[in-house]
Each structure stands twice: as C-alpha cells, then as structure tokens.
Image (tube, rainbow, N blue to C red):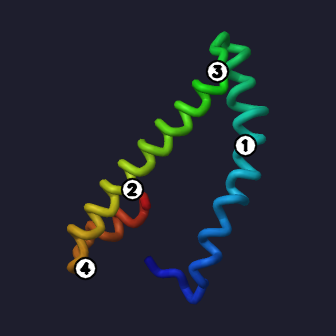
Amino acid sequence: MSMHDLPNDVFSNLDPFALIVFIPIFDNVIYSSLRRMGLNFSAVKRIMAGFATGAAVMIWATVVQHYIYKARNGSPGLAYVAYFY
C-alpha cells in the first residue's frame, strides 16, 4: 500500500475518529429508521450486526487482495481491482 510519506500512526488514529462519526449516524439514522419500520434492534442484535458487517468487510478485502496479488505483473486487471479497493 502506498502511504505517500504518511506515518503508520496516522492510520491507526483514524479508527477512533471513524467511531465518533459512525456511531451517531447509526444510532440516529439507521437504527431509528429500522425502528419506524418495525424492526427493533436490541443491544445484542446491534453487536451481532456489527460483527457480521466486520466479517463481511474482511472477506471482501481478502477477495480484493487476492485479485491484486494475482494481477501483480502489471496486467490491466490491477487498475480495475484497485478501483473497487
């Protein structure tokens, strides 16, 4: 991964900022919309949905990384895969 002279600490510090941004969005927008539609998510169901989403994202990243390694020899498939990465 090309980091363009950014230290590694910058990326590890982005996680708390993402939590600060996404927790209110999920609480005030997504879960309240689901509540209005009749789907009441308890705390345990929210945790389970978060773990399921995280697992799906890791599977997606694994597939994309596989295709990046497969197309490493400069083939045109690398640009196509990197677009979705």
Name the residue: 69% across, 27% down: 31
Q: Mark 4 or mark 3: name the one nearer the start of the chain.
A: 3
Q: Which quadrant of the structure image shows residue 69?
A: bottom left
- SS of the residue under disc 3: loop
The amino acid pointed to by label 2 is: Ala
Report the amino acid beneath label 4.
Gly
Marks 1/4: CA distance? 40 Å
Q: Give the residue type at disc 3.
A: Phe
Query: Residue visible at 74% across and 24% down?
Result: 32
- Mark 1 or mark 2, which is nearer the start of the sequence? 1
Instruction: Tell me which numbered mark, 3 or 1, is placed earlier along the sequence.
Output: 1
| Residue 76 image offset from top left, x and y in percent | 26, 71
Find disc 4 in the rendering and name its residue: 74
Which residue corresponds to the image point at 64% horizontal and 60% vertical from the top-left? 15
Structural distance between the alpha carbons of marks 4 and 2: 20 Å
Distance, label 2 to label 3, CA atoms, is 27 Å
Q: In the picture shown, does residue 44 fall above or below 64?
A: above
**Residue 35: mark in rendering:** none
Q: Secondary structure at mark 4?
A: loop
Label 4 with label 2: CB-CB less than 8 Å: no
Q: Which mark identifies residue 41?
A: 3
- The residue indicated by pointer 1 is 23
The residue that disc 2 covers is 61
Front position in the image: 71 or 14? 14
* Residue 79 falls in image quadrant: bottom left
- The location of residue 7, given as percent across then percent down, is 60, 84
Q: Residue 60: horizontal and vertical position, in percent?
A: 38, 50
Q: Residues within 10 Å of mark 3 (few under 14, many from 20)?
A: some
